[in-house]
Image: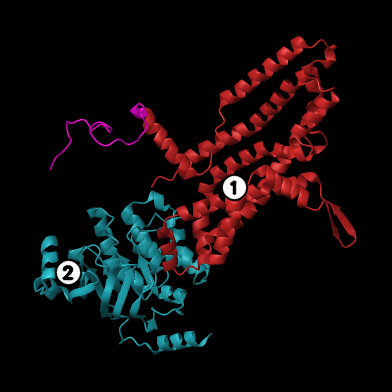
């Protein structure tokens, strides 16, 4: 192990649960000329559920994707459990074993059944024993209420069912934090409920969740903290009680008036 | 808001801008434009053999043979059809030469080309820039070179025997021809592999990355299995094209069907009435082999069309 990775490991060991699980400081990101994130800073504590809302193009999805290093960050610091993400020597695989992500387009592997989708990562990445993984996968399928669909291919499942398989697939890796990138935006209203219920159960079990969402009802019920982004900065944030009732910034008020 | 309910849709070229610049009737222009777009996207022509091609060949054969028979004043067993019948074993399978040699060459050239093409195709999507550039150059070079020139180069430059210690391996001509054919096949299959890998949605790569798969694991367990189906129709198409190209090596003396047909006719005093029957017969043989492959290719392509 080289010096850097020893230092990173030391950092990770030094992290304790009273420190923020995810800590962003002055994060900047641009795609060529287009500045998408211009100075984002906030912290997420363990077991917190936070929702990021905002208009299109405000940088919400980019922000989430920077946290598990899918997009590289130009400037600033992102620390996940004490590990610095904006570091060229970061061990991305180790980071991604701790951070689970669910996408808007489900992105299930179409050539594998639902059960195989869930089992693939623990077997091949975590190198766990196949029988044990299968047992856990079946439990996870029960947890997302998809009994009977273990041997279905993604093409045979509805959108909501696919999204729940995607959530189970990320949970199979036992992450410490789950990221949800507009996971209900591609679903019709009935199936949205199924998925939100699954996420609610997850949050109540104590999982740290970061959601980018348009579901204001869900945010109001479950979020511990809400962040409103617009044009790459956090305009306003607060717990749902104060956020929805006493929004101070005019941009926030305009956004809320359009959707509520 | 305006709606077009109860109104006929606007006619392109009259009510709105035209969709093509061809001064022809609209339905044909649309079809031609679609065809052109499809060909451009495919990048390669498809071997579209139809049954009436085969029927035409048989009619042609009967015509040539019939005229030749009527014209010939030779003894009964020296007529063109009888001569052809006598030579069929040699043309098709005797000593492993003839048409069987054509198939042998196409089989091995395809096998070598598939393995090499796969490697080259994956190199084209490598993360290392030198590997990408080198493989791209190799692919374009062998893809755009005339097959006959490549054949000449390989057959003349390749050693005809290799000494390994005390043993001397003689390399037969057909082996050199096989290697010569495998080069353009490798290049074309490399493009197919690259195209298939790049056609997989990026969401697959992203979700695999999020699950902490390495790039190699992602490629072999997630991306390539999805590519496999998409690659089969163009792969089969190239096999049919390759089989039809194998007579090229007859120029270099390899004893495959066309070369043996020429030799046979020389042996029969180079009578001109034999030309038609012999060559059209070979055309029919090739057609009988390649037609099922071409049709299966088209059927599989329809079946595996990705409906997004």
Residue at screen point 44% across, 67% down: B209
Q: Position of residue A152 (x, y in %)?
A: 42, 52
- How many residues crowd mark 2 within 10 Å: few (<14), some (14–19), many (20+)? some
Where is residue B232 shown, x and y percent of the image? 55, 45
* Disc number lying in front (1 or 2): 1
Verify whether residue B13 appears in magenta.
yes
Q: Quadrant of the C terminus of chain A?
A: bottom left
The local secondary structure at tag 2 comes to: helix
Work out which residue is located at the far right of the displayed protein and give it: B166
Left or right, A53 with respect to B67, comes to left
Which chain does the red colour mark? Answer: B
Disc 2 chain ID: A
Q: Closer to the camera, A234 or A1?
A: A234
> At 32% across and 36% down in the image, what residue appears?
B19
Asked whether, in this view, residue B157 is left or right of residue A198, the answer is right
Does A190 appear above or below A99?
above
Find the magenta span and give its range.
B1-27
Looking at the magenta stretch, what is its main secondary structure?
Answer: loop
Q: Can you give x and y, in whole percent of width and height, for residue A48 in the image?
A: 26, 77
Q: Report which residue position mark 1 lands on.
A: B144
Tell me which chain appears cyan. Answer: A
Instruction: State the image quarter where residue A40 is shown.
Output: bottom left
């Amino acid at each position: 192990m080289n010096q850097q990775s020893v230092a990173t490991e030391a950092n990770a060991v030094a992290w304790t649960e009273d420190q923020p699980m995810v800590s962003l400081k002055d994060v900047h990101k641009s795609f060529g000329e287009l500045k998408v994130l211009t100075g984002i800073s906030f912290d997420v504590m363990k077991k917190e559920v936070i929702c990021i809302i905002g208009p299109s193009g405000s940088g919400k999805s980019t922000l989430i994707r920077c946290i598990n290093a899918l997009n590289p960050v130009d400037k600033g610091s992102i620390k996940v459990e004490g590990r610095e993400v904006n570091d060229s020597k970061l061990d991305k695989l180790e980071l991604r074993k701790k951070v689970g992500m669910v996408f808007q387009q489900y992105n299930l592997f179409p050539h594998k059944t639902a059960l195989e989708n869930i089992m693939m990562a623990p077997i091949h990445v975590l190198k766990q024993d196949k029988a044990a993984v299968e047992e856990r996968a079946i439990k996870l399928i029960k947890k997302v209420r998809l009994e009977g669909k273990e041997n279905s291919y993604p093409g045979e499942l509805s959108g909501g069912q696919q999204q729940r398989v995607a959530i189970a697939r990320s949970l199979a890796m036992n992450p410490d934090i789950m990221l949800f990138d507009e996971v209900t935006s591609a679903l019709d209203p009935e199936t949205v409920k199924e998925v939100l219920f699954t996420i609610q159960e997850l949050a109540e079990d104590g999982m740290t969740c970061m959601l980018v969402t348009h579901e204001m009802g869900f945010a109001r019920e479950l979020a511990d903290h809400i962040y409103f982004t617009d044009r790459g900065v956090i305009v306003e944030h607060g717990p749902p009680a104060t956020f929805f009732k006493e929004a101070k910034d005019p941009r926030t008020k305009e956004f809320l008036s359009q959707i509520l | 808001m305006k709606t077009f309910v109860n109104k006929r849709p606007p006619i392109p070229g009259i009510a709105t801008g035209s969709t093509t610049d061809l001064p022809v009737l609209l339905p044909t222009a649309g079809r031609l434009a679609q065809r052109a777009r499809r060909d451009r996207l495919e990048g390669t022509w498809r071997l579209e053999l139809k049954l009436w091609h085969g029927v035409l060949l048989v009619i042609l054969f009967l015509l040539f043979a019939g005229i030749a028979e009527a014209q010939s004043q030779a003894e009964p067993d020296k007529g063109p059809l009888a001569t052809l019948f006598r030579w069929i074993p040699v043309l098709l399978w005797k000593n492993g030469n003839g048409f069987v040699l054509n198939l042998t060459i196409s089989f091995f050239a395809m096998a070598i080309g598939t393995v090499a093409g796969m490697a080259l195709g994956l190199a084209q999507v490598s993360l290392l820039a030198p590997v990408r550039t080198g493989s791209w150059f190799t692919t374009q070079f062998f893809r755009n070179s005339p097959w006959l020139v490549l054949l000449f180069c390989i057959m003349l430059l390749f050693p005809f025997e290799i000494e390994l210690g005390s043993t001397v391996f003689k390399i037969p001509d057909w082996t050199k021809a096989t290697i010569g054919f495998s080069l353009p096949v490798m290049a074309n299959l490399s493009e197919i592999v690259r195209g298939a890998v790049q056609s997989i949605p990026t969401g697959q790569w992203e979700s695999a990355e999020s699950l902490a798969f390495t790039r190699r694991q992602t490629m072999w367990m997630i991306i390539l299995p999805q590519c496999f189906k998409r690659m089969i129709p163009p792969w089969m198409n190239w096999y049919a094209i390759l089989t039809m190209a194998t007579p090229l090596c007859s120029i270099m003396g390899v004893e495959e069907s066309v070369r043996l047909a020429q030799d046979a006719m020389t042996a029969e005093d180079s009578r001109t009435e034999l030309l038609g029957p012999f060559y059209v017969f070979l055309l029919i043989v090739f057609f009988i082999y390649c037609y099922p492959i071409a049709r299966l290719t088209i059927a599989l392509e329809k079946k595996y069309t990705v409906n997004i």
